[in-house]
Amino acid sequence: MSEMKPMGNKNLRGPAITCIGGGTGLSTLLRGLKKVTHNVTAIVAVSDDGGGSGVLREQLRMPPPGDIRNCMQALSNAEPTIEMLMAYRFDSGDLSGQSFGNLFLAAINGISESFDKAVIRMGEVLSITGRVLPVTTQDIHLRAEFEDGSMVVGESTIPVAKTERSSRIKRVELVPEAVKALPACIEAIEEAEMIILGPGSLYTSIIPNLLVDGVAEAIMNSDAVKLYVCNVMTQPGETDGYSVSEHISEIFEHGGGRLFDQCLTSSDKPNQAILDRYFQKGAETVCVDSEAVNALGVAVLSESITAGNQNLARHDPDKLANEVMRIFNERAPTRQYGS
């Protein structure tokens, strides 16, 4: 799999950081990280079955392209027009709601030997920093079991089902259960100097990666600096009312052990107008219950990492990346890199 590794001197490219997740959270992290290291790998979940990705998945029998495309856009160094094209979403006709970037990746997949090779070729077109890897190329779905004993299959159905049942998610699992990881993903974890989980949807972006054979084990066996970046807000239909320790407990439970010993949270408090908007949608700030987190063997790091002057409570890519570098340099003093 050497063709998937960026070339150049490792020390000049910055620390080898492997990020695991999906959705907008992972792409936000990558957008900042590409400015502090050229040696970044994104391992992305491929269980999405909703929206435009779900349509292409069903009609073309390919893995869902959306999260992969988002991550490549975040790492892209292409001309502005190309970036605008990748983000363009049709608003009428049969393609209404579909992203051009998704269609572009689908077309490349059609002329490639496999989906992972299609992702490589799209990365070349977009001149991305680092690399993006689907965690597997198998056709997988996500199944959730709720505390009331009921079950649903399909990532897009989980939030709706949870809300309708008013029951917490007990466990999620992959269908089929035995899923092989892309070998390059295991290599990226084993070779990483730092491994980051999150930010992102707990049950539908982070945990699905850990359910793929070998991924959680590779993380636990790694001597890299390991960090979890917790979401700023809870997610309606998924983590309603969850504290930081509950996020971590679910990751450890599904991953089969303590996968990290540090958790980064935001010390910024969104203004009341923003909180009111989120509250109307059923979301609230994630409670940082430090004592409960410490009891899990995890240290809480609280820093100013959210974006200011906007209407959303989200991480700021540059603040987050700079904090990641500070944590890396503090925990790996013999492997210092600039931020």
Image: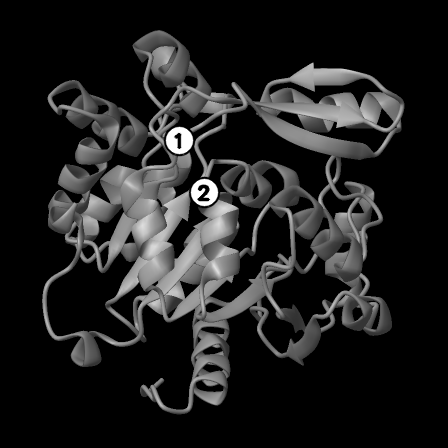
**In this view, 61 is above or below 171:** above
Q: Residue at x 36, y 59 (%)?
A: 190
Q: Is mark 1 in CB contact (under 8 Å) with mark 2?
A: yes
| Residue 142 % position (x, y) | 58, 24
| Residue 156 % position (x, y) | 60, 23
**In this view, 130 is above or below 295:** above
Q: Nearer the viewer, residue 301 or 75?
A: 301
Q: Earlier in the sequence, mark 1 or mark 2?
A: 1
Q: Give the Cα distance between marks 1 and 2.
A: 8 Å
Question: What mark, if any, has residue 180 been given in the picture?
Answer: 1
| Residue 199 % position (x, y) | 56, 56
Q: Nearer the viewer, residue 113 or 106?
A: 113
Label 1 SS: loop
Question: As drawn, is 245 to the left or to the right of 38?
Answer: right
Quadrant in which the C terminus appears: bottom left
Quadrant in which the N terminus appears: top left
**In this view, 115 is above or below 191:** above
The amino acid type, in three-letter code, at marker 1 is Lys
